[in-house]
Image (tube, coloured by chain):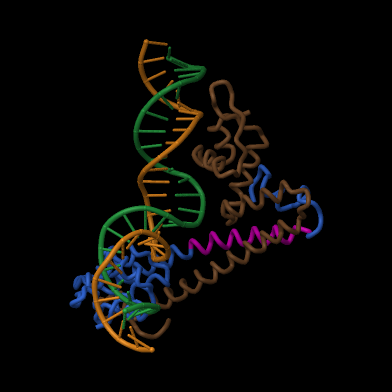
Chain colours: A brown, B blue, C orange, D green
Amino acid sequence: MLNIGKAAREGGVSVEAMRYYEQQGLIAAPDRDANGYRKYSADAVRRVRFIKRAQDVGFTLRDIGDLLSLQADSGASCGDVRDRARTKLGEIDDKIVVLTRMRDVLATWTDACPSEGPVSECPIFDALERDDET
Amino acid sequence: MLNIGKAAREGGVSVEAMRYYEQQGLIAAPDRDANGYRKYSADAVRRVRFIKRAQDVGFTLRDIGDLLSLQADSGASCGDVRDRARTKLGEIDDKIVVLTRMRDVLATWTDACPSEGPVSECPIFDALERDDET
DNA sequence: CTTGACCTTAAAGTGCACTTCAGGGTGTAG
DNA sequence: CTACACCCTGAAGTGCACTTTAAGGTCAAG
C-alpha cells in the first residue's frame, strides 16, 4: 500500500491529478489509514497507469471512463475495445490531415517569402488578406 | 460601410467573435453610426479576414496580435514574418509527430485485437496496464 | 522541538477562443 | 401594431485537465 505521493510517482501523474481522477470517478475512493491519508493498492496504481497510458495515445478522460466501464463489464468483448480504439484512430487521423494542410500552406508561404523587403510587399501578408482561398 | 452582422459574414467569423477581437485589441474599435451600431470599413473587414486566415493555418490570437503589429511596423521586414511562419511550421510539425506516434500505437493495438473474446483477455487492455513502455 | 516533507479539504484559477445569458434598444415589412 | 431580425452592454459560462491557493494536520530526522 502506497500513499498518494508514491502512487502518483508510480502511475506517472501528479498528486493533484490523482485526486482529480478520484473526484471524476475514474478511480475509486481509496481506503484511508488512521491519519486520513489515502492508501493505494497495486491494483489502484495499475488503474492510474491505465489512465495515463490511454491519455498518452489520445483518449480523453471521458473516453477513458468509457473504457474503464467496458473493462468492468463482463458482457463486453474485445471487439468493443477495438471499436473505441478505431474511432480514436480516426479522430487522430482527422487531426493529422488538418495539421498537414496547415503545414503545407505555411511551407508554401515561407518558400515564397524573401527575407528582404518591407512587410507591405510580403507575400504571406498578401495571402492572409486576399479574397480568394488558399 | 457594413454593420457587424455583414462584416462578420464577409470575414467568415461570428458576430460574437468580432466583438471579442475588438475587446482583445486585434481590431480597432470601429466608428458607430447614430444608433450606436458598429460600422466597418472594407479595410476593417480585410483585417478580420486576415485574423481568420491566420487562425486557419494555426496561429493563435496572441500570435496574430504579433503579426498585426509587425504589419504596422515600418521597420519590420518580410523576413520577420517568415520567421513567425517558420516557427509555427515547426510547432505544427511537432504536433504531427506526436499524433503520428499515437496513431501508430493505436493501429498496432487494433491490429492485435481479435473482435471476439472477453475484455479480460484484450491485448489493448493488457498494453494499457503493463509496466513497460509502448 | 523545530524543520521540512508529506498529507488533508474546498474552492478558485488557468489557457484558449469564444458562446451564452440577461436585459434592453432599433428598424422595417406586413 | 406587431412580429422579427438585427443591434447594444457586461458578465458569466463552456470544455478540458488539471493547477493553484488557502488554511490547515502528520510524521520522521536531527
Of the pair C20 and B95, the residue shown nearer to us: C20
> Which residue does the image show at 56% across and 43% down from the upper left?
A21
Tell me the residue at 65%/59% (across/down): B106
Q: Quadrant of residue B74?
A: bottom left
| Rendered view: A18 above or below B101 | above
Where residue A67 appears, as percent x and y from the top left, is 66, 52
Is A29 within the magenta? Answer: no
Q: Is residue A28 left or right of residue A19?
A: right
Our reading of the magenta stretch's main secondary structure is helix
| The residue stretch that appears in magenta | B94-114
Residue A128 visible in this rendered orientation of the protein: no
Q: Quadrant of the N terminus of chain B?
A: bottom left
State the image coordinates of residue B68 (x, y, percent, origin top left): 27, 70
Instruction: Specify the farthest residue to the right.
Output: B117
Report the side of A133 relative to A63 (left or right): left
Q: Position of residue A127 (x, y in %)?
A: 36, 80
- x, y percentage for residue B96? 52, 64
Residue B98 seen anywhere in this rendered image of the structure? yes
Q: Is residue B4 left or right of residue A101?
A: left
Report the number of numbered marks: 0
| Above or below for B7 versus B84 | below
Instruction: Give me the residue at 54% from left, 68% from top.
Output: A96
